[in-house]
Amino acid sequence: MNEITTFVLLLAAGFVLGSLFFGGLWLTVKKSVSAKNPAWLIFGSFVVRTGIALLGFYYVAQFGWKAMLLALLGFIAARFMVMYFTKKYDEKGNLLK
């Protein structure tokens, strides 16, 4: 694989990890309001989300520090994308204008 393809794949891997992490966080916060036992939901979600992110970064780490940096950039970019898309929804799940 050439270098540009590798960089794009590493950015995409970080973006997917970040989307899972921050998207899962948003869903957890939304569900915890009406959950019977929100503490367990929040704790369980934290463990699963962090575990997935750590496993993903552990796999990326075998390619070196540059790969980790690119994956981290994708992870941070996903944070801003999730923030952008979730701001458009109000508490009833309706799209804001």
Image (tube, grey):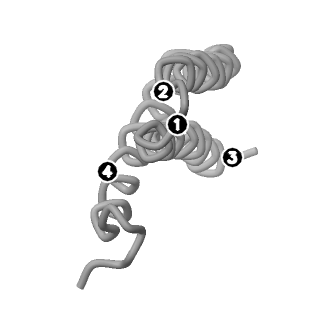
Q: Residue at x 38, y 76 (%)?
A: 94
Horizontal side of 17 relative to 78 (left or right) equals: right
Q: Nearer the viewer, residue 32 or 48?
A: 32
Identify the element where label 4 is drawn. Answer: helix
Q: Residue at x 51, y 33 (%)?
A: 71
Give the labeled residue for mark 3: 2
Give the labeled residue for mark 4: 80
Decide if residue 65 is in sight here.
yes
Checking the image for residue 38, the label placed there is 2
Q: Residue at x 48, y 26 (%)?
A: 38
Between the C-alphas of marks 3 and 2, the distance is 47 Å
Between the C-alphas of marks 1 and 4, the distance is 27 Å
Label 2 crowd bin: few (<14), some (14–19), many (20+), radius 10 Å = some
Between the C-alphas of marks 2 and 4, the distance is 26 Å
Instruction: Name the amino acid, label 3.
Output: Asn
The quarter in which the C terminus is drawn is bottom left
Mark 2 touches mark 1? (CB < 8 Å): yes
Q: Specify which label sits upstream in the sequence, 1 or 4.
A: 1
Mark 1 touches mark 4? (CB < 8 Å): no
Identify the element where label 1 is drawn. Answer: loop
Instruction: Name the amino acid, label 4.
Output: Phe
- The residue mark sitting in front, 2 or 4, is 2
Residue at the left extreme of this rendering: 97
Mark 3 touches mark 4? (CB < 8 Å): no
